[in-house]
Image: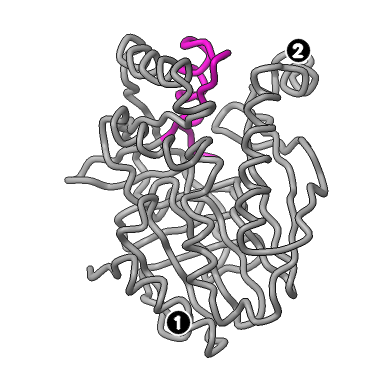
Amino acid sequence: MHWLNKEEGFETINKLGSKREPFLFLISYDKTKIFAQPLSDLDENILYKLEDWRNYPVKKREKDFTFSKTPIDFSTYKKAMEKIVEEIRSGNTYLLNLTFETPVESSFSLEEIFRYSRAKFKLYFKDEFICFSPERFVEITGDTIATYPMKGTIDANLPNAKEQILNNKKEMAEHIMIVDLMRNDLGIIASDVQVEKFRYIDKIKAGKKELLQVSSKITAQLAQNWRDTIGTLLDQLTPAGSITGTPKKSTTQIIDRVENYKRGFYTGIFGIFDGKDLRSGVMIRFIEKKNGTLLYKSGGGITIDSTAKSEYEELIDKIYLPF
């Protein structure tokens, strides 16, 4: 597989957009690997869904499956989190999204997991990795760009779960920081930035559990010629603030030092330009096949008010199949 590097990738996206050619794009977390291919020539072993845009038929699950996970131990997680908290105390970051990879096993193949998963944004890429993400990155309709940062997760079955998550000071602070970061990011490329909806709730099926997740909607106005520079715009907006933290530059440097693996396409973005409008998702809820082993990547935001036990439980809660 020949990936485009950063310069080649964003230039290819610019060219496809300027020709108004519908295409699929993938951008890795660190932007060192980019994929961009016209939909008219898309490889058969790439499947996608972005809300009601999809290239495969719906298939109902008719058989049982097994799924097991082997998360890192709590002490390992706690040591990494303590390094993050020390960086926060030193003023180098205020919020950092700490992630780990977890070996998982399932009787289903990657493609079967993809087909049966229920999610707004899904991708199956050549039996190498899949994602079934609840999180939009940006969508562009007409000349309006919107982003939907998602921060804050709670088990929906807990008593007064909605009130708990909305009134939690740590979760509130985390969400405000990401909304502020994304407002600033949109302000770099667009005008008239507005927070249209602040901290609304989505319910997400997480295996046997249901989760509540908190999102906001931020909009701005692009120049009318934005389709000629889609690659440049995506370069300026990535990596997504919701999966790095703030301030973005120093926080990503800390992530590189503390996390014990390379994220790859996990927490990158993928999307479709249909010749007129654009939709994209953040590649979370992500499973990668590596040397025959399935690795599920997950994490959560760390702030000065975080507790290791609750953050560790959130990391594990996010390892599920959304059937």
Indicate the amino acid at tag 2: Pro
Total number of numbered discs in the rendering: 2
Q: Amino acid at mark 1?
A: Pro
Element class at badge 1: strand
Disc 1 or disc 2, which is closer to the eye? 1
Taking the image as shown, residue 55 lies to the left or right of residue 43, namely right
Residue 163, position as x, y percentages in the image: 80, 19
Q: Is residue 103 placed above or below 27 in the rendered structure? A: above
* Image-quadrant location for residue 177: top right
Considering every residue shown, the one lying at the far front of the view is 91
Q: Nearer the viewer, residue 49 or 193?
A: 193
Read off the residue under disc 2. Answer: 159
Residue at (61, 52) in percent of width and height? 136
Highlighted magenta segment, given as a residue range = 298-323
How was this image coloured?
A: one colour
Mark 1 burial class by Cα count in 10 Å: few <14, some 14-19, many 20+: some
Q: Earlier in the sequence, mark 1 or mark 2?
A: 1
Residue bearing mark 1: 38
Q: To which quarter of the image does residue 46 belong?
A: bottom left
Residue at image point 54% right, 77% down: 229
Q: Residue furthest left?
A: 291
Residue found 31% across the figure and 27% down from its top: 258
C-alpha span from label 1 to label 2: 48 Å
Q: Residues within 10 Å of mark 2 (few under 14, many from 20)?
A: few
Residue 163 tag number: none
Mark yes or no: residue 99 visible: yes
x and y, in percent, of residue 256 in the image: 31, 36
Spot occupied by residue 73 in the image (x, y as percentages of width and height):
32, 14
Please tell me whether residue 306 belongs to the stretch shown in magenta. yes
222 drawn magenta: no
99 relative to 32, above or below: above
